[in-house]
Amino acid sequence: MKLEFESSGERWSISCDEAKAPGTLAHLALCLPLPLQLHTPKIAGNHIYWHAPFVTEVEGGMEVVQAPPGAFIYWPVRQFLEITFAPLQAETATVTVLGQLDGPVDGITRLAARLRESQGRQLFTGTLSLADAGASSPRSAKPSSVPGHIQAARLQLWASCPPDVKNLTQSRGIMHPAGPVFMAESEARILHENLWWIRERRARDDAASLRYTAGLVLNRAATRLHDFCHLTTSSKILLDLDAAIAADPTLFEALLDEAILCSGRLAAWIDLQIPWNAVNEEFRSALGGSSTSAMEVPA
């Protein structure tokens, strides 16, 4: 399978080995062409990424720090699709390598530098599409058992940034917008990670306990986002998912994947509002180069 990644007027070809990751690439093919909003990394560095609109396990796992420059990878627990351009900074995670960039990584490196400087002030978009001229059409997705109103809310969430997320950056109260924006991003991201951990324990733990735990973390995060961070409408889909899980235990696995998609996408939209590089530079400046922590009292 050959893919084409386009952003900022440039195009890159990616060759994928379907024998190494057939399941993940089949999920991806069903989503193509895929509109993208690009994110800059905050910890691992040296890659660009966007959120994947599907949920599936690791195939042929590789430690993420071992991924070579130009690797096209799927990071399940983060639900990222990403392209590396240099060795990553230390982070422990197992990922699926889907393919490799055809040609040098210089263009991706330049794109990543612009993205790092401008995220939060400029939206970097792109498209991932199937490049094989004679490729066969992917198989149709299986009909979903998820209630229609939840599917519709998830599709709307993936289609555009929720208005209350955009409005979050407009507040000028005390410690606003940084306080509620950072809190909301953290709440949504941690919810996403918690739901992934629940999913990974399906084969080991009691189903009723997992359903209870999923409902608990959904309700807690939704309440926090609604009451504390003022995301009064974006939190509703999380409450709807909590209610649906409680109403019909037979739909739990499908609803869990739906919850992962929704919480990950919400976290992604909030992340895109944050000028991470400027925040990091201001943080360094505020510390003044001192090696003394603010919590340490000089003798």
Image (cartoon, helix red, strand yellow):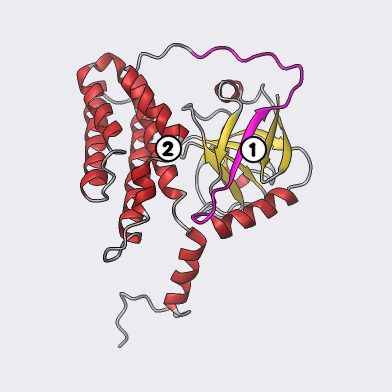
Count of residue discs: 2
Q: Residue at x 63, y 42 (%)?
A: 83
Determine whether the residue tagged by mark 2 lies in a helix, strand or loop: helix
By secondary structure, the bulk of the magenta-drawn segment is best described as loop
Q: Is residue 150 positioned above or below 281 on the image? A: above
Q: Judge whether residue 198 can be spotted in this image.
A: yes
Residue 157 coordinates in the image, percent (x, y): 40, 33
Residue 183 coordinates in the image, percent (x, y): 31, 53
Q: Is residue 242 left or right of residue 294?
A: left
Q: Judge whether residue 202 can be spotted in this image.
A: no
Q: Which residues are magenta?
A: 119-141
**Residue in the foreground of this view, choosing between 157 and 172:** 172
Contact check, label 1 and label 2, Cβ < 8 Å: no
Residue 184 coordinates in the image, percent (x, y): 33, 49
Q: Quadrant of the C terminus?
A: bottom left
| Residue that label 2 marks | 265
| Residue that label 1 marks | 72
Query: Are there few (<14), some (14-19), or many (20+) residues within 10 Å of tag 1?
Result: many
Which amino acid type is shown beneath numbered disc 2? Answer: Arg
Q: Give the CA separation, mark 1 to mark 2.
A: 20 Å
- Which residue appears farthest toward the right when viewing the image? 103
